[in-house]
Amino acid sequence: MDEIAPWEQLVRGTALHHFVYLYEPWVWPTCEILHYIGLSLLLGTVGLFDLRVLGVAKGIPPATIHRLIPWGIGGYILNVLTGIVFFSGHPDQYFYNNAGRLKALLMIIAGINIAAFYGSTAFPEMTKLPAGADAPTRIKVIAGVSLAMWVGVLICGRMLTWFRPPFFH
Amino acid sequence: MDSFLAFVEGSDFSTWIRGDSMLAFPTIITLHTICMGILAGASAAIDLRILGVASGIPLGPLRRFYPLMWLALAINALTGVLMVIGYPTKQLTNPLFYIKLSLVALAVWLVYRIGADVLDAAKSGEKALTARAKGLAAASLATWGGLIVAGRLLEYTHKWELLGIRALT
């Protein structure tokens, strides 16, 4: 690479970048561990809710399993924070990376999907579903998109390694 | 033992797993991570419920998630074996590998016990969650945490590297 783009120079000038650079041997694995704990919480709670809406374990009223979602949000926040650490440490590795770009796109779609769920009548409709009830197709589509996006985000995260830019330093 | 490791590591199949094919190591480890998220995540969500989070969720129907969790376990056993075939020296000479394996056995036993003793008992009408049930759930959460730590660190510490022994490949 000939020159470093201004945004990357900015990232590489932050205190966080220097911190990661200095303590990488323990900071990186520690953040990876937290990132994996976060993804498990997200997939475990949001995933089980999505599966219930899609028709698995219908004996559970969707509103009750929805109470697990704050733990998924906690996992998501953990992953955003550790993700910021990774990005600050090696911004080029993620920015010039098609897996990284697809991951960002899938996260945006997941975000729009979440807005469509809580911002529409889908959410209040879901809370009224009793045990054994089949969710309306519209809500099932939202759950299916959610599940597909988070699994997709995980796949892209794993694929980052193999789509690193050739000039990665 | 070393000649056996050399035999496995030198085989065509082992070489293919380590090779450049995106169907080999990248796919194997991605499946391993997805299924880790499903199994650890769903199990942790059930543990949280037993510990009192989202206490409105009926325990019995949570059993319906078990087939998916056992499928995830089966895929992880298979992908785990494939990764050991790919890097036998790296894995089998690392004490951490055996710690991880022991934690897997403990985690699987806890998932089984929670299903049989806590979720099924709830189906047959037992209402109160015993201290034992909560103990199993807390142990399960701790084991998944330990497993994630061990799994992540397994990518970093290789006995042959620490001892200055060169890998065969």
Image (spheres, rainbow, N blue to C red):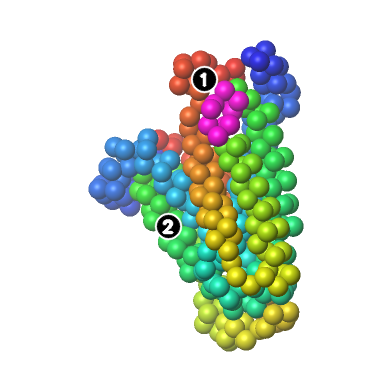
Magenta stretch, overall SS: helix
Q: Which residues are magenta?
A: B90-99
Chain containing mark 1: B
Q: Which mark is residue B160?
A: 1
Q: Which mark is residue B5?
A: none
Q: Position of residue B160 (x, y in %)?
A: 51, 20
Q: Is residue B117 above or below residue A109?
A: above
Asked if both marks, 1 and 2, belong to the same chain, the answer given is no
Q: Residues within 10 Å of mark 2 (few under 14, many from 20)?
A: many
Foreground residue, A124 or A162? A124
Q: Which amino acid type corresponds to the residue marked 2 in the rendered image?
A: Leu
User: Do we see residue A95 in this rendering?
Assistant: no
Query: Relative to residue A169, is residue B60 drawn left or right?
Result: right
For label 2, the SS is helix
Check if mark 1's residue and mark 2's residue have beta carbons within 8 Å. no
Question: To which residue does mark 2 refer?
Answer: A78
Foreground residue, B160 or A24? B160
User: Do we see residue B86 in this rendering?
Assistant: yes
Q: Position of residue A85 (x, y in %)?
A: 37, 49
Chain containing mark 2: A
Q: Is residue B33 above or below residue A141?
A: above
Q: Which amino acid type corresponds to the residue marked 1 in the rendered image?
A: Trp
Residue drawn at the location 51% of the way across and 15% of the way down:
B165
Quadrant where the N terminus of chain A sits is: top left
For label 1, the SS is helix
Task: Give the CA distance from mark 1 to mark 2.
Answer: 33 Å
Query: Relative to residue A25, is residue A76 drawn left or right?
Result: right
